[in-house]
Image: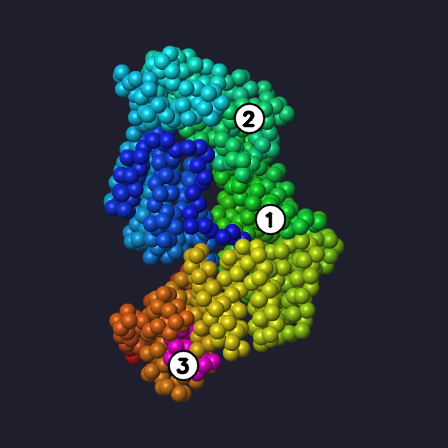
Amino acid sequence: MRIMVTLLRHNLPAEPDRFIGRERDLEELCGLVGEVRLLTLSGVGGTGKTRCALQIAARLAPSFPGGVRLAELSRLTRADLLVHEVTKVLGVHEEGVRPLLDTLVDFLRGKKLLLVLDNCEHLVEACAELAERLLTSCPDLRLLVTSREPLKIPGELVWRVPPLALPGPAEAAEELERVESVQLFLDRARAAGSGLAVTAANARDIARLCHALDGLPLALELAAARTVAMSPGQISARVDDRFRLLTASGRTAPARQRTLLATLEWSHDLLAPREQVLFRRLAVFSGPFTLDLAEAVCAGPSLAAAQVLDVLSGLVDKSLVLFDQGRSCYRLLESARQFAAGKLESAGETRAMRDRLLHGLADLAHRLGRDVWATPGLAWPDRYARLLALQDLLGNTREALSWAVESGLAEPGLRLACGYMPLWVGFGELTEGRRWYESLLALPAARPLDDLTAEALLHHANLAYEQQDAAACGDSAARALELRRGIDDDFMLAFTLVIAGMYEGTKGDLALAAERGEEALKLALLAGNGWIEGAARLLLSGVAAFHGQRRESLARGEEAVAVYTRFGHLWGVTRARLELGRFADFLGDLDSARRHLEECAALAQEMGAKPVLATGLGLLGTVLARQGEAEPARARLARCVTLSRSMGQHLPIISALVALAVLAEGQDDLEPAVRLWAAAKAMEDRLGLPVWTSATPEPLLARARAEAGEGRVQLWWTMGGGMTEEEALRYGLEGERPARGTSRPPAGPASVLTPREREIVVLISRGLSNRAIGEELFISPATAARHVANILLKLNFGSRTQVAAWAAEHGVLR
């Protein structure tokens, strides 16, 4: 399942409080973003880099038609997940096993978009590599970066964020409130409830405090939170004491960094013992956390679970912890979290807290994950709420899984990863999920854990199936089934059989797929689980379809819809409608196909499931084209294309091109039909993404050759294959032919073939089988067979011998 909410023009957070000062700086920076492609705001922690970046992005949003997107990287600890994080905020989805970075580049190319990468310093090398690739490939992209150190790549302009303006040596009391640092201090003090105002008696103390804190916004805010109980003079004296201690201890950090550290040390000194305990333990969270999770993880010696709420509220009041009212969760500012992490290490609690986080998240994710897909009696909104809860905890989950792999804690790590299966499938994070399962299953401690290992292998197989990686799916499914046969768990055995049966179906072993499906259905009925029962019935519907048994296929599918509906799983209903539409189309029942795909589209729209909606609309366009309904078909296909582009998807666009080709053929427009089929096939080859469709170009090509001649059809095919995606879509949807010279002209017979196909022609000429070709090129035999079929189709040959003779004649072998 893939669930995606609609993206807005920007994802900038609402400002928690009033932004003060830096007006001249902001004007200059906004102008710089228009002049350079990479602007990095640099400086020590606490200078306000993030707040400046957010202000710049908000002001410039109207200037970027492609939108403004913020990627917050402070909670990301693994460089290999950087691209995943960026694609997530952009709404870009994975496609098969295609590299996600390639999909990201395709999505951004041609868009005038501002991308903000916030807090890059701990991933500076990975961020530099990503920025350089994106700027090189996407000429209209602008990057705004915040980092304590520059990325150091060509074209970067580094702007050091200065502190807020400080009072002059003889600033009059009445002038003091116009100074930026004083304005911020007073604003936050009043927000804390102190009612502080500048008077002749306290003006010197306020000015002295702002100087002592170097005008650093974070330090000023921490000090302001204490004005409820202390005067500016008392605060200044305490900070001075702490600064002297740091200087005497030989700290070598830059002066402003020492200032922030002194302020944090002073704030920490004023905390009650329980507040100090909770504050340092909260450093284990790398992302937002809930009260329940804080109680589960942070309670222990010196702090009871029942005390966590009151203590946490106190830390919020002191501005050390932030509370998000809308999401009912908490988080630490990154500077405060790093400071707290030092305290946690000094207390000797780091390992224990990481263990507690791992176990606490494993328990929570297990409950939430099972509620999404396995627990009966829940309505869909309740299941979806569990899915969103898993998403909110993803930053902490990544940290916990990293710790599980690093420390060899296979049992809680596998439980946590298995709990996240619905999210990785539902939000399309397929590659990340597979990597976690592979890393955890490789741990020596995982070997004796048959139950968890079997479940992890099952989920790995499921993710591989979604990516159309048949080899990985088959291997993991077989290993999972072997282990599961020895465990008394009808429910999980049924699930394993469904995935194994789906794999057998893709291999073409329909008898074994049916056997798996029937056994899964019996076990699901024994277990009383509607989700697995629906999946088993849908598998059997597909088997019947490919046997040509229309009535049985559609009846089995309708049973699956009914089961999913009773179980309260709207996603299951939507997926079943999509598959039924495919099966009916394959069986030639266009009316049934149309009905199911219309219902799929309506449900996907209701859920905000954009990838499913785009896929359904592409298939629906083909069905409508076959029914001769040109205008409804074009309307669905135009919407399919818009949705697909909004999330960087190509598969539905290829389906749309096929549908437009079918539509053109139905209207006897042979040239557009051939060219659009060629464009679809070229995209499929270029991306390595096979598209499921019951339509084939062979009848069209035979007809076109008979009516227009071989030479002309070959020219059409070559010209169609040379169109860009944009040209092909304009040609198909609007009838706009590419400008002369934009499509690749035929440079001889070999130009009909892609570079990969020419490689395969050479191997065919050597007499290699599909399996041998696959081994030579590191592709599956099925992929090799598909390439061979395309070669035969393009060259209008019926045998491999003809291909070899043609290759020798036209110099392809040289």
Residue 676 is inside the magenta segment: yes
Badge 2: how crowded within 10 Å, few (<14), some, or many (20+)?
Answer: some
Residue 670 numbered tag: 3
Q: How far apart are the two marked residues, 2 and 3, measured between alpha carbons?
A: 71 Å
Q: Which mark is residue 639?
A: none
Which of 377/205 is in front?
205
Give the foreground label among 2 and 3. 2
Residue 370 picture location, percent across and down:
64, 46
The span shown in magenta is 665-678
The picture places residue 738, in percent across and down from the top left corner, at 31, 71
Instruction: Look at the image and say whether residue 612 sits in the magenta stretch.
Output: no
Q: Residues within 10 Å of mark 3 (few under 14, many from 20)?
A: many
- Give the label on residue 384, or none: 1
Q: Are marks 1 and 2 in contact (CB under 8 Å)?
A: no
Residue at point 49%, 52% (across, down): 6
Amino acid carrying mark 2 in the image? Ser
For label 1, the SS is: helix
Please report the residue visible at 57 percent of the width from the left and 62 percent of the height from the top: 602
Please give the residue where the numbered disc 2 appears in the rendered image.
Answer: 313
